[in-house]
Image (spheres, rainbow, N blue to C red):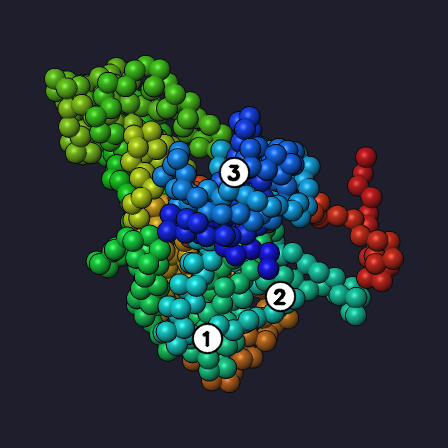
Amino acid sequence: MYRTHTCGQLKIEDVDKMVSLAGWVQRSRDLGGMTFIDLRDRYGITQLVFNMETDSALCEKARKLGREFVIRISGKVAERSNKNLKIPTGEIEIICNKFDILNASEVPPFTIEDETDGGDELRMKYRYLDLRRSVMKKNLELRHRMAQEVRNYLSKQNFLEIETPVLIKSTPEGARDFVVPSRMNPGQFYALPQSPQTFKQLLMVAGYDRYFQIVKCFRDEDLRADRQPEFTQIDCEMAFVEQDDILDTFEGLTKNMLSNIKGVEITEAFPRMSYSEALENYGNDKPDIRFEMTLHEISGLVKGKGFEVFDSAEYVGAICAESCSEYSRKQVDALTDFVKKPQIGAKGLVYVKCNPDGSYKSSVDKFFDQDALAGWASELGAKPGDLLLVLAGDKSRTLSALSELRLEMGRTLGLMDKTIFAPLWVVDFPLLEWDEDSRRFYAMHHPFTSPRPEDIELLDSDPGKVRANAYDLVINGVEIGGGSIRIHDKALQQKMFKTLGFAPEEAEAQFGFLMNAFRFGAPPHGGIAFGFDRLVSLFAGLDSIRDVIAFPKNNSGRDVMIDSPAKIEEELLKELRLRIEQAKA
Ligand code: ASP
């Protein structure tokens, strides 16, 4: 037996017991007559003591132990004179009488403690060392508990967890596919699923009316903090349901997780906001409603007063930052620089300080007198002491810039409390999105999303106006999940493909299997998928999903630990009948 207990287990009640432990040397302190070692395993840290007086040979040997050596020890539990009440085992220590080195360790490339000196890339390269740190372990434990909760909750509601294949063909979720060449079918490729979308719909046709899966999805797109080329979804589908049934079920799941994992009880229904309301009031379709500071259009108040920037703008909008009228020149300049960043794209920033004495000071005093500025302030519900920030330009870009500015102010003013969870449903998305470059419509969600029945006739006359039976769950400004009621009628699905610019043969070649299935009694159905990594990182209070994934990829999509992607053998290429084109110099 390697050990009688773990390193997180022994307490004051265990004093005088003879025990053995196994683990890693976290740290060793040599105090002349005594050597103290912190022994770590997955469960915690226990202090070991080696005493020069009682066993000098053993103590000498212990002194030579380096960081991250794996050892097994035996000894007696004793009460500590110098207690550390911050850790569960802090009242005891083990007076060791024996130990074996199970494996030596080189000096690790960074310190394996909560506050590590390792940079991101180094930690990724030695991920197995990084995962020894207790902060990382907590994230994986949380992930595990959350997955258990999902399985429990959904199983109790009669959902079946059913696996779907990974070697499939393209699922249109809006990203590029990862592909896998087929040796047995030279020149042909599988695609990895961007989601199990078509399979879960086929399961509904097959009669499995409640499906879920915690499943890997693959999307070849540019990476950001909350994106990975492979990520995990809680994927679900239900038959014989309407939008409300799905929202109720998954609102229940979310509340259950918040309650059981975070101790956060939300009793009232999640608010629902239409897509257009979200855009008008928050500037994006994933509003962070932990704080107000909503957007207000003031075009009507400001145009035609001779200020060219406003006069030529399609949209002029503002937010009101409470109690910020004392912002210095420097602070306002910093905000101006912020909105002018290329990724935000505003041309400049107009401010109005609502001074505590009731007067106004703005950067456009030349064009707008005190009465005019008072009109803006009243439109925004601003009080003396507040600061108005105004942006102008074409509508969609200005809304999105105002949204970024709002979030920046929210961050600066400490309004984004990570212990608060503010969920909402965004509903009534447009079905289609016009792309000016390719001059065609794209499905805003995916091509299987059903139009609202009352809007179907607009599909021919004004496709851009058609609303979808689609919904997103947003928590704290993070899109946690999205789904839709699906098309289950062959003719309507064909029409949808046509609207999206597919030639009938093309639609048939790509999605014939699904449209065929619709010929054989497809029930009405709909579903949703939650981004599991995002949900875990939100619950963990982190900004990146990387830290909740055991082995993530870096921003260039590389796994720097196993050094992948990598070249493959010439032989294999031949077998696959592939030839690599040399990059041009
Ligand atoms: N397949 C969709 C997605 O991955 C979710 C859904 O419609 O259920 O976003």
Give left or right: position of 226 versus 368: right
Q: Where is residue 18 in the image (x, y as percent from the top left)?
A: 50, 52
In the rendered image, the vertical position of residue 273 relative to residue 51, given as above or below: below
**Which residue is at 71% across, 60% downward?**
180
How far across and how far down the image is residue 581, in percent?
82, 47
Residue 166: mark in rendering: 2
Q: Mark 2 Cα within 10 Å, few/some/many (few <14, many 20+)?
A: some
For the point 32% across and 70% down, which residue is it? 245
The C terminus lies in quadrant: top right
Amino acid at dot 2: Val
> Which residue carries the number 3 mark?
49
The span from disc 2 to disc 3 (Cα, nearest Å) is 52 Å
* Nearest to viewer (mark 2 / mark 1): 1
Q: How many marks?
A: 3
Residue at point 57% right, 32% down?
52
Look at label 1 and name its amino acid.
Leu
